[in-house]
Image (cartoon, grey):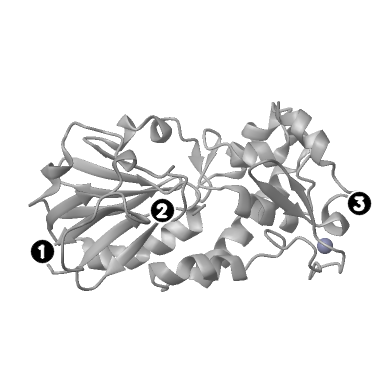
Amino acid sequence: MPELPEVNALIDFLRPRLIGDFVTRADIAELSLLKTVDPSIDALAGLAITEVARRGRALVIGFDGLSLVCRFARMGWLNWHDTAPSGPTRMGKGPLGMRVTLASGAAFDLIEPGSKKNAAVSLVRDPSEVPALASLGTDALSLTIDELAAALSESTSRIKTVLEDQRIIAGLGNAYTDEILHAAKLSPFATAKTVDPQALHTATHEVLDAARSRLIGLPPGKIKTAKKRGFSVHGRTGETCHVCGETIAEVSFADKSFQYCPGCQTGGRKLSDRRMDRLLK
Ligand SMILES: [Zn+2]
């Protein structure tokens, strides 16, 4: 799933290309993608793009009075075309969810490979009309130590769960929380209120800053590959930890898994999948 650093890199790419350009047409190719009916998607035609921003893990493209909110889910992303593909947009074929064609002759697609269609686009007058955006907590990049301390102090939840909860901290997901917990040498199962906010805050910024340097300047098609290359533990089950030399372990569920280093994070102990399953119920 694209998280804060990927969406920021995407915005860096899009801003100089989109702002000031006009939409000539917007075509929906996957009906389940569009979550709103009023205003109609046809209302975008003729509008100038005035803003390209991020809210949590969502991309928000702003027009005069309207916002197109794109939530990518696990597999969704954006494809850029310097020259818009010719021919009509075909419905329900392959990964294409939506194509926006611009007056400059360029175009961008919202795509979602795979059979599960969970990405979501909303055309709204205000981004806060999208419930998932209205409930967002403080952004991970602007979160102060005091705010983090307050979020942790009362919580008996596992730290991994708290970091991924968009209502508490916005922008992180499964991958960067694995990386942050590894950098902070914390067990994913640690109880939130026992965690030192200073150490967690430092690790969060270290991981996000490093991701920014890795991804900056890349075109959308290369951002996802570059993201994976930079990880220390996430997606690296069975590989050797570059910090301590232990073998990276994983906890897996029906539809997701996460990784950690027993040497760096859990005093050598393996975490049980069943235990986590029970905690999540
Ligand atoms: Zn390690």
Q: Is residue 169 left or right of residue 125?
A: right
Q: Looking at this view, is 83 or 16 the one in front? A: 83
Q: Distance between the Cα atoms at labels 1 and 2? A: 25 Å
**Residue at 76% from the left image edge and 60% from the top image edge:** 237
Q: Residue 166 at x, y = what percent? A: 52, 37
Which mark, by number, is residue 103? 1
Q: Is residue 278 left or right of residue 167?
A: right
Q: Residue furthest left?
A: 46
Mark 3 lies on a secondary structure that is: loop
What residue is rendered at 62% in x and 69% in y? 230
First-in-chain label (1 vs 2)? 1
Q: Closer to the camera: disc 3 or disc 2? A: 2
Which structural element holds mark 2?
loop
* Spatial separation of the CA atoms under disc 3 and disc 1: 58 Å
Q: Amino acid at mark 3?
A: Gly
Q: Which residue is mark 3?
A: 267
Query: Hey, what amino acid is under mark 2?
Result: Glu
- Residue 20 visible in the shown view: no
Q: Is residue 164 visible?
A: yes
Query: Which residue is denoted by mark 2 in the rendering?
Result: 112
The answer to the question of whether label 3 and label 1 lie on touching residues, with beta carbons closer than 8 A, is: no
User: Which tag is nearer the camera, tag 3 or tag 1?
Assistant: 1
| Label 1 environment density (alpha carbons within 10 Å; few <14, some 14–19, many ≥20) | some
Name the amino acid type tagged 1. Answer: Ala
